[in-house]
Image (cartoon, helix red, strand yellow):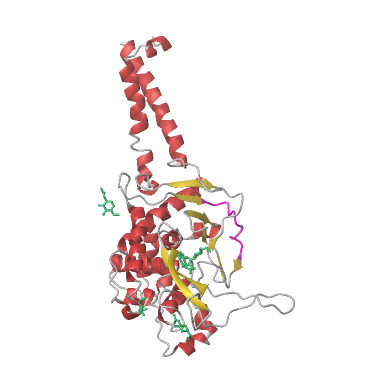
């Protein structure tokens, strides 16, 4: 007859082994969704404020998929169509190609596995919208799907993110559409949104920062000179176009800049003579779309090159708001940056995330099974 005493008198190593086995070898439990749980990346996701299990799963999977598109975007060849369209013609960007390559390389390091000496900063993910941005914008201007806080590795995921498709579902589906398969925007998915966010991290994306400083040169011919340095990457705006003004009662001089989200505006940055040579290289969306295009090229062997920016002359674009407003679908609020300052009181550090919220209960279950198994086998051993 089995008693607690008899159970406890089992050789210690046996009971310890059984329980350790239940915790460490969860075949059939955690392993089932191992491919989605990103347990073995060098960098961790932390925080998770306001996110439920389902949201965390979609965030983890998006991160995993982002790593795939950045892997496909390594080794750019600046003479090819995709590079020319998203960063500019080689002679225009010759001073910035090293910066672009560095940005793509650092972003791809999020794919590094645990134990790799090169580890990107952990990413604090959250769903609680600490800056109250998720409801900004409207259907026409677009709304935020995700936003970055302070150029640091903090990302807020708005509800719209969770409606986005997984990478491979989207790519397989769109590449089969003969009429529209070249339209890059159709491929926009949660990995593309993730890629844009990661480029805003100061530890990943580097951009050209220009400041006007008082000219102190003796006999200077101008009062100001431009100081070039490098800093974190934001979202570039269209230059030389008519900016919108918000609707207010009475006259106002508030300008709403046209932020370069979407394929049309991203490509315009790289072609218009009114943009600086580094505007495209400075724009997080350009890297995300470029990586998305490279992934389609890798998987499907064609470059989705639509829309083509071939308007003959810049004036045709600068005076045509229809072109500037471009894309029908808007995966960001086109009137606003997707980088915001951290508000006072918003936590700077994310706490540890459980490796998977539901995995904890699965471990508990398997532990229970192990105990039941233990009891049953004891019964078997001792009853005989
Ligand atoms: C590249 O940088 C050099 C040195 O700053 C400058 O003289 C040159 O005009 C730049 N070239 C282009 C294409 O921007
Ligand atoms: C670490 O990651 C880099 C890519 O960032 C890769 O080239 C290298 O082989 C990895 N090292 C190990 C030990 O896995
Ligand atoms: C991006 O924005 C931050 C915060 O406003 C600023 O410090 C940085 O210089 C900006 N980067 C560029 C390239 O302008
Ligand atoms: C500034 O102008 C003065 C007078 O024209 C001239 O003597 C001097 O050499 C100039 N200095 C420089 C640095 O060009
Ligand atoms: C130019 O920018 C660099 C880097 O931000 C800074 O160290 C330097 O003081 C700036 N120069 C002037 C004249 O402001």
Question: Residue shown at 36%/11% (left/top)?
Answer: 9
In the image, taking residue 161 as reference, residue 110 lies left or right, namely left
Which stretch did the figure color magenta? 126-136
How far from the left and from the top, in percent, is residue 289?
Answer: 40, 68
Secondary structure, magenta segment, majority class: loop
Image quadrant in which you'd find residue 139:
bottom right
* Rendered position, 182 above or below 8: below
Count of numbered marks: 0
* Rendered position, 174 above or below 126: below
Q: Nearer the viewer, residue 240 or 231?
A: 231
How far from the left and from the top, in percent, is residue 154?
Answer: 49, 53
Q: Nearer the viewer, residue 79 or 300?
A: 79
Question: Residue shown at 66%/78% (left/top)?
Answer: 253
Image quadrant in which you'd find residue 103:
bottom left
* Rendered position, 360 above or below 217: above
In the image, taking residue 7 as reference, residue 56 lies left or right, namely right
Residue 173 in sight here: yes
How far from the left and from the top, in percent, is residue 1?
Answer: 39, 9
Q: Nearer the viewer, residue 350 or 214?
A: 214
The quadrant the C terminus occupies is: top left
Image quadrant in which you'd find residue 184:
bottom left
Residue 182 in sight here: no
Is residue 24 in the magenta section? no
In the image, taking residue 300 as reference, residue 229 lies left or right, namely right
How far from the left and from the top, in percent, is residue 286?
Answer: 41, 70
């Amino acid at each position: 007859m089995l008693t607690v005493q008899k159970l406890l008198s089992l050789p210690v190593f046996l009971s310890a082994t059984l329980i350790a086995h239940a915790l460490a070898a969860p075949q059939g439990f955690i392993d089932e969704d191992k491919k989605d749980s990103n347990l073995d990346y060098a960098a961790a996701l932390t925080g998770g404020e306001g996110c439920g299990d389902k949201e965390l799963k979609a965030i983890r999977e998006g991160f995993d998929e982002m790593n795939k598109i950045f892997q496909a975007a390594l080794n750019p060849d600046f003479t090819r169509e995709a590079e020319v369209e998203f960063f500019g013609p080689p002679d225009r960007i010759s001073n910035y190609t090293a910066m672009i390559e560095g940005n793509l390389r650092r972003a791809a390091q999020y794919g590094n596995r645990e134990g790799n000496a090169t580890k990107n900063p952990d990413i604090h993910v959250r769903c609680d919208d600490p800056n109250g941005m998720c409801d900004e914008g409207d259907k026409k201007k677009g709304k935020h799907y995700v936003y970055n806080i302070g150029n640091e590795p903090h990302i807020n995921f708005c509800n719209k993110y969770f409606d986005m498709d997984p990478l491979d579902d989207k790519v397989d589906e769109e590449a089969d559409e003969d009429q529209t398969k070249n339209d890059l925007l159709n491929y926009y998915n949660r990995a593309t949104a993730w890629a844009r966010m990661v480029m805003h991290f100061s530890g990943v994306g580097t951009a050209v920062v220009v400041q006007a400083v008082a000219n102190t040169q003796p006999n200077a011919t101008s009062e100001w000179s431009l100081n070039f340095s490098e800093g974190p990457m934001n979202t570039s705006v269209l230059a030389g176009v008519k900016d919108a003004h918000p609707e207010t009662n009475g006259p106002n001089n508030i300008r709403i800049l046209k932020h370069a989200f979407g394929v049309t505006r991203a490509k315009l940055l790289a072609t218009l003579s009114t943009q600086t040579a580094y505007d495209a290289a400075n724009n997080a969306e350009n890297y995300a779309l470029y990586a998305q295009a490279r992934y389609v090229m890798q998987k499907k062997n064609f470059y989705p090159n639509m829309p083509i920016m071939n308007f003959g002359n810049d004036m045709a674009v600068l005076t045509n708001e229809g072109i500037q407003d471009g894309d029908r679908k808007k995966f960001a609020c086109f009137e606003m940056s997707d980088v915001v300052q951290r508000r006072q009181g918003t936590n700077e550090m994310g706490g540890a995330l459980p490796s998977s919220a539901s995995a904890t209960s699965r471990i508990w279950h398997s532990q229970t099974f192990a105990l039941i198994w233990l009891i049953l086998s004891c019964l078997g051993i001792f009853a005989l």
